[in-house]
Each structure stands twice: as structure tokens, then as C-alpha cells.
Image: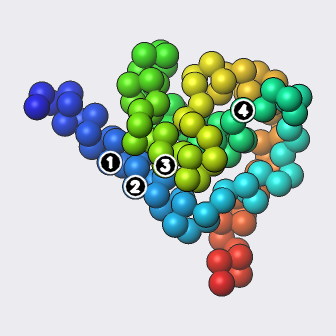
Amino acid sequence: MSNDDSEKEKYHKFVALVLESLYKYFVSPDFLFSGVFEPRHPSYIVYSQPALFTTAMFMYLFRLKSRKQIDEFLRNEKFNEIYQKIFKCDVPSGDAVADFFEMLDISETSKLSTNRFFDFTLYC
């Protein structure tokens, strides 16, 4: 295995760990997005907001810029299986993420309920 392959494998393990932890502790991350306006027409929604935001986060963390990088790194059988469990959809494409963020008013991101991460009464 080359050095690039071992690096990729380490990143894959990290992403899988983050996603599995998300599922274990939150089951559905939808509550974090309850106040965020949905700019898309309902008939065009394929991916949930949490799935799009999570994919964007991984694209940023791992500096994935091209479709090829995104497809190789995130859009594989292992992550699709985990995304299906958590978000009830496949891993969004880079184009889907870009289209969503083009439509989203940046002020909407301030409505993300990140303070709910620290409200431990939600988990008891």
C-alpha cells in the first residue's frame, strides 16, 4: 500500500468514526436545522440539509475540490451506507452541495442550533 493509500485510509476511518458517532449520539441531526429556512422547492429536495452541511464540512476539512476527489473520497459504498442510516439519503454530490449553498442566504447559517449540542437534557 502506498503512502497516499494509507493517508486516504486514515481519513476514511476518521470520517466513518465521525458519522457513526453522529448517529450513535444524535440518531437524527435534523433538530439542529429546525430554524434554518429551506430555499429549495419541495419537489427538488433529494438531500436533507444536515446531509448537505455534513458533506460540505468534510469537503472543507479534507480540501476536496474536484468532483473526482469528492467521488473517490466520500461517494463510496461505505459512506453511502452510513449516510443512508443517518440522513436517509446517499452522500450528496459536490454539485448538489454547491447548488444548495448558492441558494441559501448566509444569514440562515446563524440559525443553526449548535447550542443544542450542549443541551444534555435532549439526550437523557
Position of residue 84 relative to residue 25, above or below, is above
Can residue 2 be seen here? The reply is: yes
- Residue 49 drawn at (x, y percent): 72, 41
Amino acid on which the number 4 mark rests in the picture: Val
Residue drawn at (15%, 30%) of the image: 3
Q: Quadrant of residue 12?
A: top left
Q: In this orientation, which residue lies closer to the viewer: 107 or 1? A: 1
Depth check, front residue: 85 or 36:
85
Q: Nearer the viewer, mark 3 or mark 2?
A: 3
**First reached walking from the N terminus: tag 2 or tag 4:** 2
Element type at marker 3? helix
Say how the picture is coloured.
rainbow
Look at 54% across and 59% down and name the residue there.
Answer: 22
Amino acid residing under circle 2: Leu
Q: For marks 3 and 2, give the CA distance.
A: 10 Å
Query: Between marks 2 and 4, how big is the CA–CA gap?
Result: 25 Å
Residue 120 visible in this rendered orientation of the protein: no
Q: Which residue is mark 1?
A: 13
Q: CA distance from mark 3 to mark 1?
A: 12 Å
10 sits to left or right of 96: left
Which quadrant holds the C terminus? bottom right
Which circle's residue, 4 or 1, is located before the other in the chain? 1
Along the polypeptide, which appears first: circle 3 or circle 2? 2
Badge 3 crowding class, 10 Å Cα cut-off, few under 14, some 14 to 19, many 20 or more, is: some
Q: Earlier in the sequence, mark 4 or mark 3?
A: 4
Residue under label 2, please give it: 17
The label number, if any, that marks residue 46 in the structure image: 4
Counting from the top left corner in percent of width and height, residue 35 is at 86, 52
